[in-house]
């Protein structure tokens, strides 16, 4: 349970907040980021994309529905630390099995409560995401700040292999199998292969270190790259897998980190955003249809690609397919063959909707359409 033990939060620029311990006692460091979602904290905590990040919840009341055994998106909590304003005094849900603070404590996640999360969020919006430390054992802000400055930065961090599965596994199709897809696990959420299984796709999930021979040995109809943590500029291995797949005209779909790796494979760059997009209420426009989707995001890096028309690449014509309406950040890419047919695509957000709105569920159907239209030679080595 939450204790009244004092806790200290210090950002790398020296901004300091004092509150109460929430979760496990101790000390932790990571990149301070904020999530604007008002629900879905359990999915946020268990999303591997948050590895080495300290999440600040902008919604003031957290923990109301406790923790259940159905909603985790992976086998553990991945956040490096947790910051809330008003933790629930008790959980109130028929699905709840234990309280959030008990779960945080059981998994060794250090957090802080009772601070002004609005002020902290405004500070991060104005100054940008930065390193942070939370401690229940240190009272000297200057001493904690020095340890923050000694901690690793997110820029240049190669983290996908740290969160990826160690062994391949298969998620069978629901009902009759229509397609076989290889999913490269860069930090995949459990709902993602389930969304594909619902559409008759048998998903072979491989470690982030898998090569193109590992992919092709499954005789797939398509390749999928998942979300994940860290700097996409470090993901050379997965990028080469994508390029080899494109050379063979293997249909491709990527989300979040997978979108950034796809961009690099096409020859585009990536860069770090000031404070990123995180939450389940981000407006994105599909430039092909003009439709606006409310989407779930968790990314601190973005794709650097031109918005004013297609770019010729060694694999076909690539164009920006989706943009964020808040800041015009690239939110999707589409690659077409010489006939103008879609052969590969990606989005920067999370269509699996766990947690989040279901506006983008059609993207999994689009993937099946691309695989249906692909020539059978796509699987030939």
Image (tube, rainbow, N blue to C red):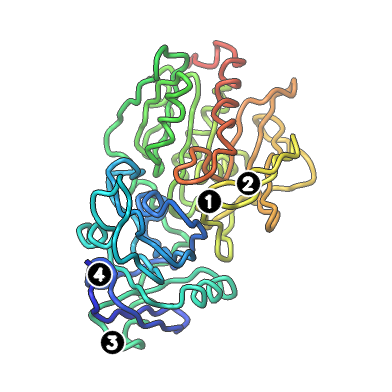
Location of mark 1 (residue): 280
Q: CA distance from mark 2 to mark 4?
A: 39 Å
Q: Earlier in the sequence, mark 1 or mark 3?
A: 3
User: Is 3 placed left or right of 61 in the picture?
Assistant: left
One can see residue 320 in this view: no
Callout count: 4
Q: Tell me residue 247's x, y (percent).
A: 57, 26
Answer whether labels 2 and 4 touch (C-beta < 8 Å): no
Q: Nearer the viewer, mark 4 or mark 1?
A: 4
Q: CA distance from mark 3 to mark 4?
A: 19 Å
Closer to the camera, 9 or 187? Answer: 9
Determine the secondary structure under disc 1.
strand
Q: CA distance from mark 3 to mark 2?
A: 42 Å
Q: Tell me residue 292's x, y (percent).
A: 69, 43
Answer whether labels 3 and 4 touch (C-beta < 8 Å): no
Determine crowd level at label 3: few under 14, some 14-19, many 20+ residues with C-alpha closer than 10 A.
Answer: some
Determine crowd level at label 2: few under 14, some 14-19, many 20+ residues with C-alpha closer than 10 A.
Answer: many
Q: Earlier in the sequence, mark 2 or mark 4?
A: 4
Q: Earlier in the sequence, mark 3 or mark 2?
A: 3
Determine the secondary structure under disc 4.
loop
């Amino acid at each position: 349970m939450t204790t009244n033990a004092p806790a200290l939060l210090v950002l790398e620029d020296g901004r300091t907040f004092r509150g109460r311990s929430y979760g496990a006692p101790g000390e932790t460091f990571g990149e301070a980021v904020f999530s604007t979602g008002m629900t879905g904290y359990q999915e946020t905590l268990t999303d591997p994309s948050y590895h080495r990040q300290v999440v600040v919840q902008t919604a003031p009341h957290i923990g109301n529905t406790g923790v259940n055994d159905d909603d985790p998106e992976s086998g553990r909590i991945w956040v490096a630390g947790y910051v809330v304003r008003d933790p629930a005094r008790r959980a109130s849900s028929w699905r709840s099995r234990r309280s959030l603070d008990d779960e945080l404590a059981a998994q060794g996640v250090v957090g802080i409560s009772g601070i002004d999360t609005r002020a902290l969020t405004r500070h991060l919006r104005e100054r940008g995401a930065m390193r942070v430390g939370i401690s229940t054992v240190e009272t000297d802000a200057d001493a904690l700040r020095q340890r923050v400055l000694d901690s690793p930065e997110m820029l240049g961090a190669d983290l996908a292999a740290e969160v990826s599965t160690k062994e391949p596994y298969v998620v069978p199709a629901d009902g009759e199998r229509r397609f076989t897809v290889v999913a490269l696990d860069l930090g995949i959420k459990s709902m993602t292969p389930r969304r594909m299984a619902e559409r008759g796709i048998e998903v072979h999930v491989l470690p982030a270190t898998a090569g193109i021979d590992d992919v092709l040995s499954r005789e797939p109809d398509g390749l999928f790259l998942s979300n994940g943590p860290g700097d996409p500029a470090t993901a050379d291995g997965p990028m080469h897998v994508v390029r080899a797949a494109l050379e063979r005209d293997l249909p491709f779909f990527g989300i979040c980190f997978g979108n950034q790796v796809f961009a690099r494979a096409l020859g585009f760059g990536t860069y770090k955003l000031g404070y990123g997009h995180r939450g389940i209420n981000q407006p994105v426009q599909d430039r092909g249809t003009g439709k606006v989707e409310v989407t779930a995001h968790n990314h601190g890096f973005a794709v650097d690609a031109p918005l004013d028309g297609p770019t010729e690449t060694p694999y076909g014509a690539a164009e920006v397919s989706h943009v964020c309406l808040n800041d015009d950040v690239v939110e999707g890419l589409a690659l077409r063959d010489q006939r103008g047919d879609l052969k590969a695509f990606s989005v920067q957000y999370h269509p699996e909707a766990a947690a989040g709105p279901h506006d983008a569920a059609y993207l999994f159907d689009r993937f099946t359409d691309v695989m249906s239209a692909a020539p059978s030679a796509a699987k030939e080595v």
